[in-house]
Image (cartoon, grey):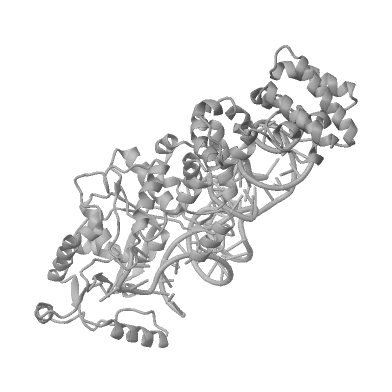
Amino acid sequence: MRFAPSPTGLTHLGSARTALYNFLIAQQTGGSFILRIEDTDQKRYDPNAEADLTNSLKWLGLDWDEGPGVAGPHAPYHQSQRMGIYRQHAEDLVSAGKAFYCFCTPQQLEQDRKQQQERKEQPHYAGRCRELPLAEARARVAAGETHVIRFKAPKEGSITVVDRLRGEITVENRNIDDRVLLKSDGHALYHLAAMVDDHLMGITHVFRGEEWLPSLPLHAHIYEAFGWPQPEWVHLSVFLKPSGKGKMSKRDTEQMRLSGQSIFVKDLAAMGYLPEAVLNWIALMGWSYDDRTEFFALADLVEKFDIDKLNPSPSAIDFKKLDHFNGLHIRALSVEDLATRLLPYFAAAGYQVSVEQLLPIVPLIQTRMTTLDEAPELAGFFFKEEVSAQADTLIGQGLDVAQSAAAMRRAIEIIQGLAEFNTASLEEPMRAAAEELGLKAGQFFGMLRNAVTAQQVSPPLFESMELVGRETVLTRLRAAVEKLES
RNA sequence: GCCCCCAUCGUCUAGAGGCCUAGGACGUGGCCCUUUCAAGGCUAAAACCGGGGUUCGAAUCCCCGUGGGGGCACCA
């Protein structure tokens, strides 16, 4: 199995899913998962993209058995370092009469295309150099003339290729173009490089995006020309925009980032999503296990993934569902694990806290988060020296200032009089106080919550008070009384 | 324009001729629980693109139409 991205931009969900499926099959079959970098196009090469790619895969937990940084029998893993191999294979094809040298200039080709379009034909290679005698062509090459090597696609008949998800796909050979295999700069094109590498690296299953489907017949012909057995072809459906209308464009992704969402793995990590959740989410976009199971850890996926349950139709990206999975996976984490993962988010929000400090707090917020970055907002009041509640939030629902201040004073009295200060000891006397004051629990507890946490929304009151500590609670309540009376 | 693929609730999907009164999940509404917010439990609304075949019987098979998507580079 292999995952062979081209480093031209940030790693996105589509790539991540392809990588995941490759990884799963490799794990399942005991095969190796090879990471190969398709960097044959130096015009589009982005030096940051490769680092982003390896970071993204590592974050997701999809470690490769061979590839950059992990030596193996099929090295090198950058196509730019395999130029000699491609040249050799292209020349072999020429010698076998399955490919030819082409000396057409880009301008000529451009003009051909234009004329074809005017005649309402499908743009294709006009065939000028296709039948050039080999000796003559070789002489021109030897003389240093600029050239490319093109595949000599059959013109008669048709070809039938099997895609694992779609069955037999038959295409008339006249619709298959004489595509360039080797550029004039000596670099191979995908059509050559990927086929050669997949064969040489012993790839049994080719998982790739549906956008490759139109060139599948060409690729099958290339395999045939070399006399190689076909791999298992699996073309995954594309991901559509959340609206379901069309593939994500560059503009869409930018706009999405502006509105706080993203299809880039790197962004998802920063936004507080768990790799487990992202994996679970994308695994189910185009694949399902049965009619009800939806929660999967990576190990479950390895065990249960099945190519035959893949769905060939395109799917729209649904971030709501990601939120749901994230919540599920957050709740599935142990307290220690979650506390550890929360650390960087507290640090980013300006709180210097330790795992030990977080341990008692985590159970209080674990069911209240959909993303990890919400934690500091939810639990920040535990770590602040002082909190400052809005004066109007200190007034109980339906009460006036004097009543509120009185209620607050009563709470202070009770807390001072408690032999022990904890959740259990607070509950009863506080409820009694509410009744005695003629207040509903919600009225009384609501104002106290605001006084202690300065938040309208917080973990349960008494648990929070216990963790904040008696002295700090009293200080905050007194401050609230003062604020009410001024 | 040409080529290819796809088609079940708004979305992700189950469904491989009778188990379908079409199931699950997200989201949405309601109820319960409840000191806020969540989580959790219960519940409701919500789909087989259309037309022709084949068959005793079709969401499932075939054809046509329509719609959607992808591709037509010395990019991947």
Q: Which of A96 and A379 lies nearest the eye of the viewer?
A: A379
Q: Position of residue B70 (x, y in %)?
A: 45, 65
Residue A331, visible in the rendered structure? yes
Residue under the image location 85 percent in, 34 percent down: A485
Above-or-below relation of A274 to A38: above
Rendered image quadrant of residue A113: bottom left
Above-or-below relation of A70 to A163: above
Residue under the image location 52 percent in, 32 percent down: A338
Residue A21, visible in the rendered structure? no
Left or right relative to A454: residue A407 = right
Q: Position of residue A233 (x, y in %)?
A: 34, 54
Which residue extends farthest front? A486
Q: Quadrant of the C terminus of chain A?
A: top right
Q: Which of A304 and A85 lies nearest the eye of the viewer?
A: A85
Above-or-below relation of B52 to A335: below
Residue under the image location 19 percent in, 45 percent down: A73
Q: Which of A129 and A143 lies nearest the eye of the viewer?
A: A143
